[in-house]
Image (cartoon, coloured by chain):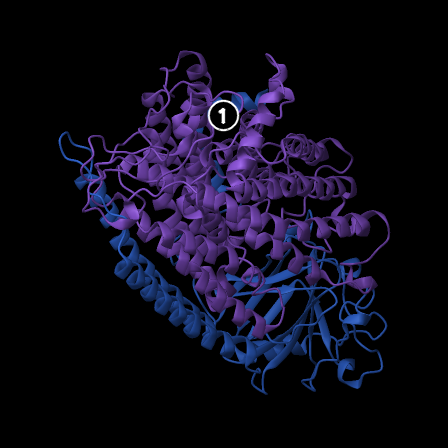
Chain colours: A blue, B purple
Amino acid sequence: MSKFWRFCRVGVPGALLAGASTGGAEIRETGVWWLPRNVSHFGHEIDFMIYVILWITGITGILVFSTMIYFIVKYRHRGGVGAIHSHGNNTLEVVWTTIPVFIFLGLAIYGNEMWGRMRMQKAPADALQVAVVGEQFGWNVRYPGPDGKLGKMDSHKIGKDNPFGIDPNDPDGRDDFTTYNDLVFPVNRPVQLHLSSKDVIHAFYVPEFRLYQDMVPGRVYDFVWFKADSVGSFQLACNQLCGQGHYKMFGKLAVVSDSEYEAWAKGKAPAATASLGSSAENVATVNR
Amino acid sequence: MSTATLTHAEAHSHHDHHEASGWKKYLWSLDHKIIGLQYLFGSLAFLFVGGGLALLLRWQLAFPSTQVMPDGNVGNPLSLAFINPQFYNALFTMHATVMVFLVVMPVLVGAFGNYLIPLKIGCGDMAFPLINELSFWVWLASGLIMLAGFFVAGGAAAGGWTSYAPLSSVAAYNGTKIGQTLWAAGIFINGLASIMGAFNYITTIVNMRAPGMGFFRMPLAVWALFITAFLLLLAIPVLSAAGAMLILDLNYGTNFFNPAKGGQPLLWQHLFWFFGHPEVYILILPAMGMVSDILSVNSRKPVFGYRAMVYAMIAIGFLGFIVWGHHMFVSGMSLVLSAAFGVSTMVIAVPSAIKTFNWLGTIWGGSIRFNTAMLNALAFVSMFVIGGFSGIFMASTPVNIFVHHTYFIVAHFHYVLFGGSIFAVFAAIYFWYPKMFGRLLNETLGKIHFALTFVFFNLCFFPMHNVGLGGMMRRIADPTVYEHLRALQPINQFITLSAIALGFSQFVFLYNFFRSLRHGEPAGKNPWEATTLEWTVDSPPGHGNFATTPTVYRGPYDFSVPGHGKDYIMQNEPPEPDYPAGSPARLRPTPAG
C-alpha cells in the first residue's frame, strides 16, 4: 500500500527523474537516440552499411508514404465521382518486381563481401589470441603468456574445473594467465577470440565494437577477430538469454595502449596448472 | 461437376444435424461459424492476458527492481518487488508464447479461417466439422497448459519463446523444469490443433468450392488461408518433434540438445527456426489476404494485380522454408551457410514489396471510404512497410553482427506482428463483425480506438529502433546495470508509458465490441456493398450458410464495372444479356462448370 502512496506523491515526472538517476547515469557522448561510439575497424564498415540501407529504405519510404497519402487524399470518396475500373497492369508488375530484385541482390552481394572479410578471412598472424568461455553468470578469460601461444582448447574437456578445456601437459598453456570478468585489449592490434561456453549458450556482445557472437557449449569458435582503433573502457555484455542472472552477466573491457597492456599482462601470474584457470567458485569478484 | 455434387451432398448432410440451442451451441457446435467465434473470443481473451504480461515486463524495464540499496529498499521507488529477474524472464517468455500461439495464430487462422472459408467459397461447412470443433478445444487446452506454468514450483518457462537449448533442456540450468515441460507440452498440443485445422482447410478449399468458384475466382483472403494451411502442415510437425525431444531431454534422460552428453544445441535452433520462419508468414499471410479484400471493397476497385498477389503469396510460401538460417547468422553455424541464407532472405523481401505496390495500386483511382475497417487496413500497409524496412537491416549479414538480439529486432517484429497482423485483425473484426453478429460496430468509437491505437503503437515501438541501435540488449531484466544503457533509461520509461496507454486504449475496443452486440445498428446482408459470397446471405448466416448452393459467375472483385448501375456485382450474379460488348474478355461472366 505504501508503494501506491509513494506513487501518488512522486507522480509520473518524478518517476522519470527517479529512474534516470538510478545508479548515477552518465549521458553518452554521441547522444542517446543513435549509435554508440565505435572503436573497431570492422565497426566503421558496419556503420557505413547501416547508413546505405537507411538511405535506400528512407528514400523508398518517402516515395511509398507520400504516394499513399496522395492517393488517400486524392481518391477519397466524393459524391458523383466513381472509382476507375482496373484489374492491374502487367508492365508495372514486371517493373516493380525487377527493381527490388536488383536492389536486394545488390545488398546481399555487398553484405556477403563484407561478411566474407569479417568472418571467413583468417585473423592476421600477429593477432593477440584470447580465449573467452562463458558460464552462468560470468566470463572466464585466458591470455597467452610470454610465448604468445594459448594452450590448445578442446571443447570435450571443458568442464567445471577446466573452463577452457586445456590439456595440463600442453607446454603452450603453462604460461597462460587467466582473469574473470576482466578483459584488456591493446589498441591497434588485431585480437583473435576463441569462444566457448561451459554450460548454456552465451553471447559475446560489445556494442562499441559492433560485435555479437553466440558462444555455444560443445564448440570452440575461433573465427571472430577485430582491431580496436581507439582506447576506452567498455562493458562486455552477455546477449543470449542464459538464465536468471543473465541481465547482470557483464565484464569489464578496456582498450589500452600497447605499453599499458604489456604492463598489465606482466602483473598477471601464470594460471596454476592444477586449477587450469579461474571460475566462479574460486574468484572473489562478483557482479555488484 | 463432381464439385457441385459433393457440395450439395455436404449442404444436405449439414441440414440434417441439429443446431444446438442457447448457450450450449457456443460450447459444442459443429458449425464452422460458431467454432470461428469460439476462436475469436478465446484469442481476444488471451490478447488481454498477453498484453497484461507485456505491461508488467515494460514496467520492470522502466522502473527496475533488481538494485537493492544499502537500506534494504529496491533502487527505484516505483519498482514492483515481485518482478524478480527469473519472473521477468518468465514474463517475456510467456508474453511471446501467448501472443504467437494463443492470439495471432488462432485469431487469424482459427477465427477468420473458420468463419470465412466456407462462406467465401460457397459451401455449408468445413469438410470435417467434428475435427474442427476438436481442434478448438485442443487449442484451448494447450493455452491453459502453457499458462499453468505460472502456478507450479519454479514458475513458468523462462527461456524465451525460442527456448534455446541447453538452457531450456537441462533443468539444472533453467530452474523451471515443470514450467518448461508444460511449455513444451503446450506447444506440442497446440501443434495438434493447428494440424487438424490445416488439413481441414485444405480439404475444404480443394473439394468444396461452389460451382463456378475456380481457384482464380477465390478472394485473396481464401488464397492466403489456403497457402497458410500448407505452411502449417509442413512447419508445425517439426516444432512438435522439437517439443517432444525437449520433454524427453528434461524429464527422461535423453540428451538430444545437451553437449555435455554428446547432444547438439544448434539442432534445437535448426528445428525451431525451420518451423519459426514459415511461422512468421503464417502470422502475416492471412492478414495480407484479408487486408487485400478490405482495401478493394472500400476503394470500390478490384484488387490491383490479383494474380500477381496470388503468385507473390505462393512465392512467400516456398521461400519461407529456405530462410530460417537468418535467425542464426551469429549462432556459429557454418559461415558459408549464413551467407547463403543472407541471399535467400533478401530475395524473400521481393514478394512483400510486390504486395505493397499492388496495395497502393488498389487504392489508386479508387473512391475510398474511410470507415474503421479501412483505416486499420491502411495502417496495416504502412506499418508493414516500416517492419519490412527494419527487416532489411537485419537481413544484411554484417549489420546483423551488430543489431542481433538488440531492441532493434524487438521493434522490427512488433511492427510486423502488431503493426501488421494486429491492425489487420482489427480491420477484419470491424469488417466482418456485422456478418458475425448482424450488427455494425460503432464507427465513432471505432475511429477513437483506431486513432489511440495507431498513435500509441508508434510512440511505444518506434523508439525501440533507437534504443536497439543504441546497443540495448533484449531479454535483460534491468538495463540500468549497464553503463552504456543508463542514459537510455528516459526513453525506456517513455516507451513504457506509451505501452500502458496503448494497452488501456484497447478497452475502447472491448466496450464497443460488447455494446454493439445488443445496441449496434442492424447490418443487413451486405453493409459494405461487397461482392463475395458471404455478403449474399443473412447476417449472421443460418445453419448451413446457403439455402441453395450458390453458383459463381465472376471473380471476387467486380467493383465499378463500366456500364453498370451500381458499383459492385455479386460473385453469384448471373450474366446479363446486355453485358457491355466492349469489356475485356476476362471480365465477361462464364457459365458454371
Q: Residue extending furthest left?
A: A80
Could you tell me which chain the residue with mark 1 belongs to? B
Percent position (x, y) of residue B501? Answer: 43, 30
Residue closer to the observer: B100 or B289? B289
The 10 Å Cα crowd at callout 1, few under 14, some 14 to 19, many 20 or more, is: many
The residue lying at 74 percent from left, 75 percent from top is A269
Residue closer to the observer: A226 or B151? B151
> Would you say residue A160 is visible in this rendering?
no
The answer to whether residue B572 is above or below residue B393 is above
Percent position (x, y) of residue A128? Answer: 61, 80
Is B129 on the left-hand or right-hand side of B323? right
Is B183 on the left-hand or right-hand side of B65? right
Tag 1 secondary structure: loop
The answer to whether residue A152 is above or below residue B165 is below
Percent position (x, y) of residue B426? Answer: 42, 32
Residue ID for mark 1? B545
Residue closer to the observer: B581 or B306? B581
Residue type indicated by callout 1: Asn
The answer to whether residue B398 is above or below residue B288 is below
Residue closer to the observer: B131 or B326? B131
> Would you say residue A99 is visible in this rendering?
yes
Is B163 on the left-hand or right-hand side of B7? right
Q: Quadrant of residue B18?
A: top right
* Total numbered circles: 1
Quadrant where the image shows the C terminus of chain B: top left
